Image (tube, coloured by chain):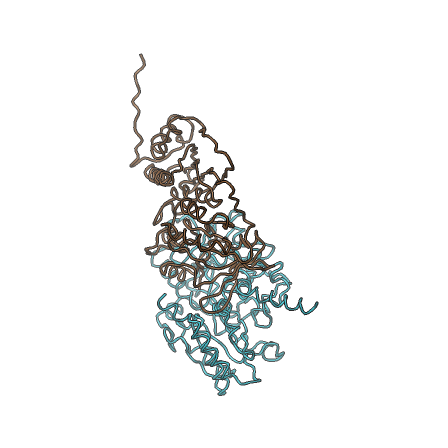
């Protein structure tokens, strides 16, 4: 396939792998966090970790919007959807995310809630137009990539005079989350997570550019490479990070020059700024409360903000205590460290969001990497005899 | 003297099914005769009995049933009617059997246009004639608006097994080869291209086809070497291979580069975020064949119009975990898992 296969060329990838192995200093170790679940997925799907020398390790970050949504907000959405007259429109990824007490949107739908799976904000708008008797709420979620479409949906609702459309806003911000990780005790004090550099998500930077990372690359002296999602993109980004570390640099570099610029998409940024403002604080699964890490609709658009319009109360509910999603999202643990992984928690019976979302680290491990663990078990068993 | 009533014809162009068409009275009778009997036309239906009789061959028979609820009802390359005939024929054919007769049950939503019903019925008639497998009995029910999605069809079929042939789900053995009869994912991509909320332009058409002719050629060429056959419908090739691995207590190792895949299908899957291995097929089969018979069976498949692109995609291996694994074109390995939940595009 033109412009796809070129970025999945195994021979080229092995060539980059040789260069990484050649340039990584013997005895030194390099710990890089790929922030985004899309990168985690690519790394697992293409077996990239197997191509890296032993000193280069990848740490999976929290960049999966479904994964970082706390259970309390799923509970709030379910409560809202169960109210008569409400139609909740959501992307399909959220349907199976567990709420507390073994609930989910999928189960709420079966119990009678009017929940519709949509593919875009436009579809939710169309439902609001064609069914004026329903209060249509769009479950808005995602990083900077999905925020402009939500802004445009509110803009369109205003232009069309739709009074039955609102947004349950869960948009979160990438740079704030990375900064939060760098400031966390795990990284700064306890030393339980070592991070020598970041791979930043290219699709986010098509909107925000690379410039927002410049502050903390400098402040925390950590290199950042904004990279695409194809396996060659990721391999090249790792090589660029190895070089920065070797040369003592901590710059923001752009691997995805085919679409990302330093300042991003101005038109999209203007729309987002017009409709959204920063939340002083927002709960992330795993990271806890992240200051200025999420968006809400501006006060003048309160009529379109479902939380205000329907007086949504976000309950104080918590994850299953045995679920390690939080530690996995912070990079402290890997999916295989979780006792529930592959036993009680599978994609068919998920206990935590990281197993549900296709971008989640647990899902990626389950889907593509299970056999590695079994090889290991195999090996351990054989050695034990 | 009683005046002779004039029977008015069904208004196929503008008319719609109403509740009286399922009530057992004259209206229902007229619907059945004017649409279904006309489309399926055969001696059994003309006899007008509640059941149909046929002679039973010596040896073993197979029987199967399947429900069809596809949305949308019409898609590039076929409709719910062609699926209802071909799908049930294929379930019979996967045993290596020759399909003989079909039944068809319709659950129709009040308000469904006669014109669409006639179109579906004539697709079924055409498919059953081409497959030489007549629909010899049927049933019609009408439910209130909102209680069904246009029309649901349920078909059952019976077939005759060739003497001595016994294909079983647990028959795959390490060393056997896995063959697919052609390009994968065509049906699912064609259907999704017409779903109301994600319409996209594509040249891809559904691969819906009755496979018993292809199967007969395979049986003739290598019956003793055939272990089992499956048609990879819902859940795609991934689900079928996982079923085989589980039931036969083996692992399966396939090679991405050997799997026939149309570039258009690969492209559609790419932008919808789907794995072609999870996308449904309606005119393909997967065969597990003993290695010594693989060339003969593959040759027979490639000589048949429905199997021209047949390819060996992998082999059965020993694996206590019963994993399906794939060597990727990229050069790594990965698990090919069942699909969890509904196949839906991702958001970012």
Determine the colour of chain A. cyan
* Residue at image coords 37%, 68%: A271
Image label count: 0
**Residue B290 at x, y = what percent?**
51, 54
Q: Is the residue A164 above or below the residue A353 in the image? A: above
| Figure quadrant of the C terminus of chain B | bottom left
Determine the colour of chain B. brown
Q: Residue furthest right?
A: A385
Is residue A259 visible in the rendered image? The answer is yes
- Kindly indicate the quadrant of the structure image that contains residue A79: bottom right
Q: Looking at the image, which is closer to me, B207 or A68?
A: B207
Q: Residue furthest top?
A: B1
Q: Looking at the image, which is closer to me, A335 or B284?
A: B284
Q: Is the residue A5 above or below the residue A185 in the image? A: above
**Residue A120 at x, y = what percent?**
40, 58
- Kindly indicate the quadrant of the structure image that contains residue B321: bottom right
**Residue A63 at x, y = what percent?**
50, 69
Q: Looking at the image, which is closer to me, B166 or B5?
A: B166
């Amino acid at each position: 396939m033109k412009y796809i296969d070129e970025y999945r060329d195994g021979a080229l990838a092995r060539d980059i792998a040789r260069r990484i192995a050649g340039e990584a200093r013997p005895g030194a170790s390099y710990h890089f966090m790929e922030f985004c679940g899309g990168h985690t997925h690519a790394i697992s799907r293409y077996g990239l970790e197997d191509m890296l020398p032993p000193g280069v390790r990848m740490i999976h970050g929290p960049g999966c919007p479904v994964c970082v949504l706390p259970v309390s907000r799923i509970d709030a959405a379910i409560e809202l959807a169960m109210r008569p007259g409400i139609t909740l429109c959501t992307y399909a990824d959220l349907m199976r995310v567990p709420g507390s007490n073994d609930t989910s949107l999928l189960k709420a739908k079966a119990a009678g809630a009017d929940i519709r799976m949509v593919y875009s904000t436009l579809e939710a708008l169309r439902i609001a137009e064609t069914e004026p008797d329903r209060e249509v709420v769009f479950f808005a979620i995602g990083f900077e990539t999905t925020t402009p479409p939500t802004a445009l949906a509110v803009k369109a609702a205003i232009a069309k005079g739709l009074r039955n459309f609102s947004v349950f806003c869960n948009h979160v911000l990438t740079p704030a989350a990375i900064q939060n990780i760098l400031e966390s005790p795990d990284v700064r004090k306890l030393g339980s997570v070592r991070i020598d550099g970041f791979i930043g998500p290219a699709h986010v930077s098509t909107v925000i550019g690379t410039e927002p990372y410049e502050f903390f690359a400098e402040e925390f002296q950590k290199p950042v490479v904004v990279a695409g999602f194809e396996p060659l993109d990721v391999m090249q980004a790792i090589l660029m990070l190895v070089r920065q570390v070797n040369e003592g640099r901590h710059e923001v570099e752009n691997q995805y020059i085919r679409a990302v610029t330093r300042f991003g998409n101005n038109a999209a940024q203007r729309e987002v700024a017009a409709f959204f403002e920063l939340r002083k604080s927002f709960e992330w699964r795993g990271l806890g409360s992240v200051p200025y890490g999420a968006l809400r609709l501006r006060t003048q658009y309160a009529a379109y903000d479902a939380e205000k319009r329907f007086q949504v109360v976000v309950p104080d509910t918590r994850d299953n205590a045995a679920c390690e999603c939080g530690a996995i999202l912070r990079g402290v643990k890997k999916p295989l460290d979780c006792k529930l992984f592959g036993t009680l928690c599978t994609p068919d019976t998920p206990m935590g969001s990281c197993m549900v979302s296709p971008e989640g680290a647990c899902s990626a491990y389950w889907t593509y990497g299970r056999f590695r663990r079994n090889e290991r078990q195999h090996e351990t068993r054989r050695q034990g005899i | 003297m009683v005046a002779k009533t004039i029977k008015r014809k069904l208004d196929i162009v503008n008319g719609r099914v109403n509740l009286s068409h399922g009530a057992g009275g004259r209206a229902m009778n007229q619907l059945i005769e004017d649409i279904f009997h006309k489309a399926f036309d055969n001696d059994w239906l003309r006899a007008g009995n509640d059941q149909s009789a046929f002679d039973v061959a010596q040896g073993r028979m197979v029987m199967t049933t399947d429900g069809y609820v596809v949305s949308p009802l019409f898609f590039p390359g076929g409709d719910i009617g062609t699926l209802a005939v071909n799908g049930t024929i294929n379930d019979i054919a996967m045993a290596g059997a020759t399909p003989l007769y079909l039944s068809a049950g319709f659950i129709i939503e009040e308000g469904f246009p006669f014109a669409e019903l006639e179109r579906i019925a004539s697709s079924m008639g055409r498919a059953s004639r081409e497959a030489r497998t007549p629909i010899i009995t049927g049933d019609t029910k009408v439910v209130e608006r909102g209680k069904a999605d246009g029309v649901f069809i349920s078909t059952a079929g019976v077939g005759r097994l060739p003497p001595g042939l016994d294909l079983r789900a647990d028959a795959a053995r390490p060393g056997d080869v896995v063959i697919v009869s052609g390009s994968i994912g065509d049906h699912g991509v064609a259907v999704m291209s017409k779903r109301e909320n994600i319409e996209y332009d594509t040249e891809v058409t559904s691969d819906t086809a009755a496979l018993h002719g292809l199967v007969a050629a395979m049986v003739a060429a290598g019956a003793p070497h055939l272990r089992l056959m499956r048609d990879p419908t819902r859940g795609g090739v991934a689900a079928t291979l996982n079923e085989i691995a589980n039931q036969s207590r083996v692992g399966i190792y396939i090679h991405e580069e050997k799997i026939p895949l149309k570039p258009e299908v690969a492209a559609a899957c790419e932008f919808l975020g789907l794995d072609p291995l999870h996308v449904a097929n309606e005119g393909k089969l997967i065969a597990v064949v003993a290695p010594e018979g693989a060339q003969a069976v593959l040759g027979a498949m490639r000589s048949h119009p429905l199997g021209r692109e047949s390819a060996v995609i992998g082999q059965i291996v020993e694996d206590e975990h019963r994993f399906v694994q794939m060597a990727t074109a990229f050069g790594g390995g990965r698990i090919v898992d069942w699909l969890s939940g509904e196949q839906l595009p991702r958001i970012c």
